[in-house]
Image (cartoon, rainbow, N blue to C red):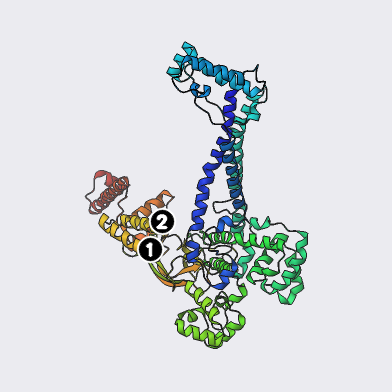
Amino acid sequence: MAASEENSGLFPIFILTMIALPLVPYTIMQLCRAASKKEKSINCQCSVCSRSGKYRKSIFKKISNFSTWSNLTLVLFWIIMGVLVYYIKTINREVQVFEPFNILGLQPGASDSEIKKAYRRLSVQYHPDKNPDPDAHKYFVESIAKAYQALTDPISRENFEKYGHPDGRQGFQMGIALPQFLLNIEGASGGILLLWIVGVCILLPLVVAVAYLSRSSKYTGNYVMHQTLSAYYYFMKPSLAPSKVMDVLIKAAEYMEIPVRRPDAEPLQKLFMLVRSELNLDLKNIKQEQAKFWKQHPALVKTELLIQAHLTRQTATLTPELQNDFKRVVEIAPRLLEELMKMAVIPRTAQGHGWLRPAVGVVELSQCIIQAVPLSARKPSGGSSEGIAPFLQLPHFNEAVIKKITRKKIKTLQELRDMSPVDRVDFLSETANFSPTEIQDIESVLSMMPSITLEVKCGTEGEEGIQEGDIVTVQSWVTLKRSNGLTRALPHSPFYPFHKEENHWFLLADQTSNNVWFSQKLSFMDESAAITAASKSIEESMEGSGANPGEIGKAVREAVEKVKTGSRLVMGKFQAPSEGSYNLTCFLLCDSWIGCDKKTGVKVKVVKRTRAGTRGGLVEEVAEDGGEEEEEVEEEEYDEDYESEYSDDDEEEEDTSNKNKNKKENKKKENRANGKGPASSSGSDDE
């Protein structure tokens, strides 16, 4: 029983260890994240962003915010750990080494008479005949009597001197740290132990595995449901206008799971009247259009109204329940838009190209959601192709201020950014009557806006020019600059209630055919990852072209320096199309800022295939697939003297024998004509 008590005393230590193993490193990680200067140094410092409460400067921001279940759970586990430490320290008794002299209250080396005298004295105090207390009885039997025996009995004393215990060598004991109440169940300890093993070793891992598999079968790696991807793939069309991208976005399965409550009907009706002008309804048949809108699935109606409320900055009128639904809708919107972008640029055509028009529409919708700008504000007006939308992302700007500015021949945001700081301050104070504090906020946001430059090259590795069917390598250095000197930064987005990092999409596309030839997502937030990716790409590219190690090392060092100065390398491959000249456009689209996109023209000239080795390989590949005579005819017309190195020897021998046979027949005819032929030939002639 004593052994079971010792084992049960280890149970709090076992529980403390199991809690501390994941809790301590997780807490350290959270503290390191909260103490990092990333958010404090790269977020917008304007007063509007400060009032939004998204960028709190305290290092305990994520831990002191008790509005999340993760933080509450973290604190609860630390409280449990404190209670366990207190229990182990104050209640559990410490296992002591057997010391007979200390038990009898004697000094080491005491005589036999002193030992007997001390034993009689303690017997009067703790013997069961003198003291009925069970604890006294237990102490007398397990400690006093055993100590006296160890010092007076010769065998026990010899064992004590050799092994440290009167009973001789003590065996090593092992036990399972179970609580005492489980071990006190008479006759059931084996069953309880079996249940414990089955529950911890089998059922718990099984439950975790089932939960993980059920979630992984439902969601992708980007935490987007598979059902959503299927819907996006089905509804994505090549002619999808930017204004219609919203209709595809709201069809996500995640939005269909948002509950539609009866009390939400009236607030949604009021919200509909506020955002009705943004819903692309036909004003001529407004009643029919409204009825058609409300006949949609309730979840679709609710989601679109909540997004439009965000775009028009009408979220303050929402009820607390709708506020929670709104946060859920806009929180997952960036992930859904990223997957929607992938569905737009995924190869759809026979040439492996994606679609440009819906891709641009997805990025424009993402920009509007992050900046809380209505889509109608992007309509061209006043000499600007993007309308007044770029101005609306600046603090303290509204339609009235924009009208005042455009009257002074500032039609675009870029023109305002190109002004010198002194001229801009004078212009804003005189034209829009902004105060110095408001101008400072505007300057802070303008200094956060990125300026992009592109260097794009397309070519075939190891070859001159681009021929039909070549694998073309596109290499582009994208350089980002800000007037405040930062490379990585969080966008100014006070109306978007969550943290959002900048992402850019690199698209090489043919605007005429609406085809995206190459696409890649680009981020300036992680410099170390960019250095690794650029070094690997440069090394693989130069190794393929036959460069020596010295040249490769020099190119890698130059690429690393470029990345450190704010550049990112985009590198990819695509197959060259048929012969012709192509005027492509390289886009760099930002998903967070309006009016900061960059595009440049790229000319790609593809000539007819002339490389013999590659052509022979193509002929062989076609022959394996069944043979196409048209391609062979075209090649013969191009080079009549060309003889394929893959010609068959049997065919050559057959051609030679045919030629010899023809020569013999011609010679026979000549002989017959001259009367010199053989008898057989003459016989045949007489006949």
Return the mark for residue 229: none
Q: Is residue 533 left or right of residue 660?
A: right
**Residue to which mark 2 is pinned:** 629
Q: Image check: 18 left or right of 297?
A: left
Q: In this rendering, does residue 614 appear at all? A: no
Where residue 464 appears, x then y in whole percent?
31, 64
- Ranked by sequence position, the earlier of labels 2 and 1 is 1
Which kind of residue does numbered mark 1 sit on?
Val
Image quarter in which the N terminus is found: top right
Name which residue type carries label 2.
Glu
Residue 459 appears anywhere in the view:
yes
Q: Look at the picture and state if 91 lies above or below 473.
A: above
Residue at image location 25% in from the left, 57% down from the top: 550
| x and y, in percent, of residue 515 in the image | 50, 66
Q: Secondary structure at mark 1?
A: helix
In the image, taking residue 493 as reference, residue 463 lies left or right, namely left
Task: Name the residue: 44% across, 59% down.
Answer: 526
408 vs 471: above or below: below
Position in image of residue 491 (x %, y %):
52, 68
Q: Using the image as rendered, state which of residue 319 and residue 230 is in the foreground.
A: 319
